[in-house]
Image (tube, grey):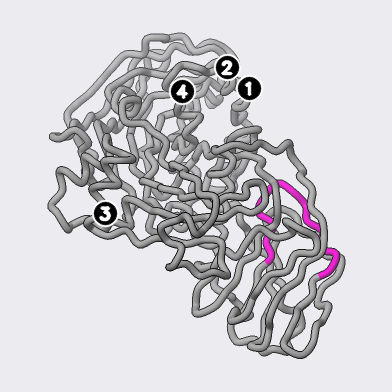
Amino acid sequence: MLDPLTILNTIAHAERLLKVIKVFKRDNKPLISAKHLVVKSSSVATSLLSGRFEELYRQLRSKRIYLVSNEVSNFFQKVHRPHIRIQEFNTWEETPVASLRDRAACQFDKTITAEELPKLAFAYDPMITGQIVQTTKAGSLDPGRFVRVTYFEDGCEYTDVAEIIEVRPAWLVLLWLENLSGGPIRIGSYSGSMYFPNDPVGYRSFSEIEGEDYSASVSFPVLQQDESILIPEYSVLAPIDHERLFQGSRLIYEDDMPDMSLRYCYEGSGLGDNTHLIGPSLTIGQVEIEDKSYEVHRFDIENLLTVSPSLAVGSCPVLIGYREGRFRYLKNALVRNPDETNIQGYQFAVIAEIEDEETLLAEVRLVREHQEDVILKNRLLRKGESIVIPLGGDSVSLILSGTYRATREVVTGDLARVFKFEGIRALLADLERTGPGPLRNSGKNRSLESAQRVWDLRG
């Protein structure tokens, strides 16, 4: 996992890490590191809850992991579910939004009404969203904050139109104790306060985390070198638009593994106000190690160390259009070569590479009403890079020629499709946050070179 030197050096250069990581010492030498870990990855949560640690040993580079079973893990195991479901349509005409969408765009966000919310909640998430709707006063919930329905055409790996139904994701927060001592360590017990809700879900804000006194012993008391114990603390109902809120965060640390990434970021603007607790919650105050009590720092929702999904789903660069103050996903570009797109009415176009791949734009041509110009040649885009192209009012289409190649082994299937969709969502959220930036007041004659911009899409 994180070796002692990395932890100590990182804390020395980023004091805010003290809100996430604390190193307990004996004789001024590292003994145990205590970290609050937020499991955002549904597959990692499933592996933990089912006791399938073999893959996690390899990916997290840990000799052994022990998971403590308590009231928090029991609740989370009962309600944990996929937060995204996909239904496929052959064409846009078969979808219920065929007459509503912008025909130039390959994405349509459906507005959910208060009347539709209960039906969708009980159909797709009866254990959490359904219970919240049932126990909350009618009309007091914003439907768009609990269910999101999007129609999305990939056009690259998939030729159909996907109806993507999302509910708020559930994340598991763990206290992660890791032996840094170089030898065996005895873990005695942990204590703090446990909150037990009055209803099956207990949907509440983070200000309601106090509870009754609680203590428990650890059933595997001897922790060998490089072994870890995970103690469940909270079940968190994250915002449905968490990718937008995370775009305002500052990424401090990132370690990519085959199917997940370990990330630390802070200053998640608005994340705490839009995140809620569900089920029992445990606030750990003390841990007994080698017959000595150590104080545990409090979990901070604005400072997160997370296990997040990380899949290589490289396929095509994406093309985004900007008009009427809004960014819109137009398509996956270079599905064919050359690839022409109608951009009438758009002020800017953004060509972005958001996957683990490299795109070589051999040529970009802008077609206007009375002329056609080559505006870019031989430009390489790597993951996290994008190019902004100012468009004039007489622009008709954009023609891209080029190639792309994956830089990691690519996976396919529904999980990869969802991950790719979430990547596009994150890109749109980042563009909405930053706006067209220096291009806001640019004229038609502004050169492409001065209009280029690179966004950090890691979020």
Where's residue 77, x and y in %?
Answer: 35, 25
Where's residue 261, x and y in %?
Answer: 59, 38
Around disc 1, counting alpha carbons within 10 Å, would you say few (fewer than 14), some (14 to 19), or many (20 or more)?
some
Residue flagged by tag 1: what amino acid is it?
Arg
In magenta segment, residue 222: no
Which residue is depicted at the point 79% across and 52% down? 404
Residue marked by disc 4: 48
Residue marked by disc 1: 58
Disc 3 to disc 4, how far (Cα)?
A: 34 Å
Q: Which residues are magenta?
A: 351-363
Q: Which of disc 3 and disc 1 is earlier in sequence?
A: 1
Nearer to me, 447 or 294: 447
Around disc 2, counting alpha carbons within 10 Å, would you say few (fewer than 14), some (14 to 19), or many (20 or more)?
few
Disc 4 to disc 1, how far (Cα)?
A: 14 Å
Secondary structure category for the residue under label 3 = helix
Which residue is depicted at the point 64% across and 54% down? 155
Secondary structure category for the residue under label 4 = helix
Residue marked by disc 2: 54
